[in-house]
Image: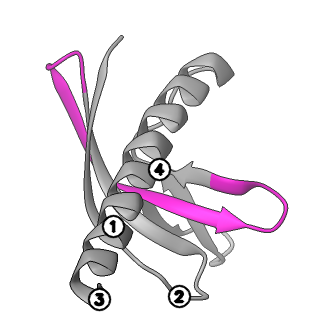
Amino acid sequence: MTFSVRIHNTFDNDHPVKGTASVTMDGMFAVHGVKIMHSKKKGLFIAMPYDAYKDKDGKNARRDIFHPINAEARKVMEEAVIAAYTEKVNAKAEAAAEVNA
């Protein structure tokens, strides 16, 4: 499976969300709203778009709208998204360095 990734936003702040992306799979399916996250334990990882709702006990819950079926699929998708994110962040840094030079 091939992934085409478009990074929409990157955030340089202390918040765990570092960016947002859309992913197209094999040129046939697209998923929007993928978040690039960062934590001290995991480093960079992706979070799938989700639907928030109240469960039967009235507690807040969430359910992924889209998700890979197994760990291998998640790993391949995550690597593609993080590579695109890293490329975008590096390009922004290079552009800023050129402006400041």
Q: CA distance from mark 2 to mark 1?
A: 18 Å
User: What amino acid does circle 2 point to?
Assistant: Asn
Q: Amino acid at mark 1?
A: Glu
Residue 10 sits above or below residue 31 on the image: below
Q: Position of residue 31 (x, y in %)?
A: 27, 41
CB of mark 1 within 8 Å of CB of mark 4? no
How many angstroms separate mark 1 from mark 4 (CA)? 29 Å
Residue 75 coordinates in the image, percent (x, y): 60, 28
Numbered label attached to residue 94: 1
Could one spot residue 49 in this view of the protein?
A: no
Residue wearing tag 4:
48
The structure residue drawn at horizontal position 20% and vertical position 26%, both measured from the top left corner, is 29
Secondary structure state at the residue bearing disc 2:
loop
What residue is rendered at 33% in x and 57% in y?
A: 88
Residue for badge 2: 13
Badge 1: residue crowd in 10 Å (few <14, some 14–19, many ≥20): few
Q: Are marks 2 and 1 in contact (CB under 8 Å)?
A: no
Nearer to us in this view, 16 or 52: 16
Q: Are the residues at dot 2 and dot 3 in contact (C-beta closer than 8 Å)?
A: no
Quadrant position of residue 16: bottom right
Observer-side mark, 2 or 1, equals 1
Q: Is residue 27 magenta?
A: yes
Q: Which residue is mark 3?
A: 100
Quarter of the C terminus within the rendering:
bottom left
In this image, 98 relative to 81: left or right?
left
Give above or below for 18 relative to 83.
below
Whether the residues at callouts 1 and 3 have beta carbons within 8 Å, the answer is no
Q: CA distance from mark 4 to mark 2?
A: 21 Å
Residue numbers of the magenta segment = 25-44
